[in-house]
Image (tube, rainbow, N blue to C red):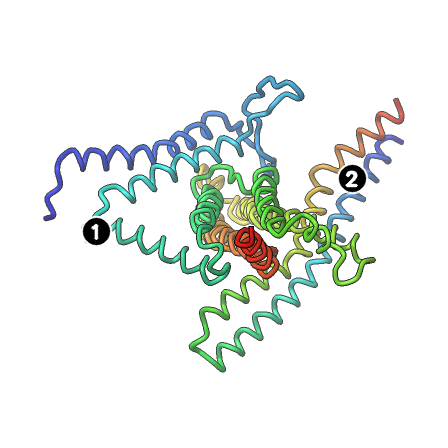
Amino acid sequence: MNKKSRLFRLVDVLLLSLAAAPLVGGVVLQVLTKPPSQGISISGARIHFTLPAPLQALPITEAQINSWIVIVSLFFLCLYMTHGLAVRPETKRQVIAEWLIEQTESLVANNMGPYFKGFAPFVAAIMGLSAVSSLLTLLGMYPPTSDLNVVGGWALLVFFLITYYKLKAGPLYYLKSFAEPVAFLTPLNVIGEIATPVSMAFRHYGNILSGSVISVLVAAALQGLSRMVLGWLPGVLGSIPFLQIGLPAVLSIYFDVFSGCLQAFIFAMLTMLYIANGFPADEYEKRKSHKQNKVKQA
Amino acid sequence: MLELAIGIILGSCALGAGMAMIAGIGPGIGEGNAVAKACEAIGRQPESKGPVTTTMLMGCAIAETTGLYALVIAILLIFLAPNLLVNILLNAIG
């Protein structure tokens, strides 16, 4: 039973290496193209090259390239997880994949209700993309989530989805919902509507960026401190920042691992809650039954 | 004279960034309250630990928003505003 054909194993190795290749390539690209920095350097995404485009030159930044790295890597990882599925799970990875899918499906069903059951893949995709993007800092790469453009794009996508589901009960009902509970609150409601994607984008981007800024500042401060305290040591020993050992790693566990995963979860949770809460379920049901009655009468 | 003007711009940007982060007090107090209440709730009903923790994290994320707005303003003031303002000054002088 445990005997797998050679072809199966070959495909396994191929898929795993294809999942790892983009990450390795990203690290190599980072090492090759990053200019040496002196002291504290906090910068946005570096621009690799610009493509000519009709309206404005299109810069291809580190954030875009790293996003694609994450996408390709996750794609092959998913292919690996679902390779060789059986009715009775034979491999550990099938059990893990089934567990993940069950978890997301129950999360979506609990938070969004039965109408939005099909949202599980979307939510899982957003969560995985965001979490792995933030975890790229562990490899020393630029995390795409600390670029406002990337996260702003996701927030806009979520905003379009929210509006689409709000429009399900008809455009008139959607416009009327702005004048509630009182008509003169309309401007406030419009601002609140726009604030949703803005706050989602700022929340995610601010958390990841502040984490990396604090990490850089602490590392630089420890380097200065160790030069001051241990600078009297002879030769090479004096120039090694011994005090940098330890504390940055602890900070990295909080800011990169914990905060990154937490922000991914929060972004996905907010997506689900906003979409499910914005959807006018009662009105939609009413319209649906109304339409069905009309069809019956005709 | 020009040095003084640029110095004032840089100093004001740094001061403004620091002042913007005063907004960090609010979310700190608010999140502390939220976590305290969550601990109380878990102490009273240990079996509801999972949902309480999830709801608390969500609430903390929402409460954090104002602090993050301040953070974004501070980051803009430190990294973007000095360049922009100095350029405006230089253009005005000609």
Residue at the front extreme of this rendering: A298
Real-space Cα separation, disc 1 to disc 2, in angstroms: 66 Å
Residue A128 marker? none
Say which residue appears at 16% left-offset and 33% top-offset: A7
Q: In the depicted view, which residue is nearer to us: A123 or A11?
A: A123
Say which residue appears at 64% left-offset and 18% top-offset: A54
Q: Secondary structure at mark 1?
A: loop
Give x and y (percent) for residue A112. Answer: 50, 59
Residue B38 appears in the picture as rendered? yes
Side of A116 where B71 appears, left or right: right
Residue A233 appears in the picture as rendered? no
Residue at the bottom extreme of this rendering: B44
Give x and y (percent) for residue A254. Answer: 49, 55
Q: Secondary structure at mark 2?
A: helix
Which amino acid type is marked by label 2? Leu
Give x and y (percent) for residue A118. Answer: 44, 50
Residue that badge 2 annotates: B10
- Callout 1 crowding tier (Cα within 10 Å): few <14, some 14–19, many ≥20: few
Say which residue appears at 54% left-offset and 44% top-offset: A223
- Callout 2 crowding tier (Cα within 10 Å): few <14, some 14–19, many ≥20: some
Q: In the depicted view, which residue is nearer to us: A294 or A196?
A: A294
Say which residue appears at 31% left-offset and 53% top-offset: A98
Residue A87 marker? 1
Side of A20 where A242 appears, left or right: right
In this rendering, is residue A10 above or below B78? above
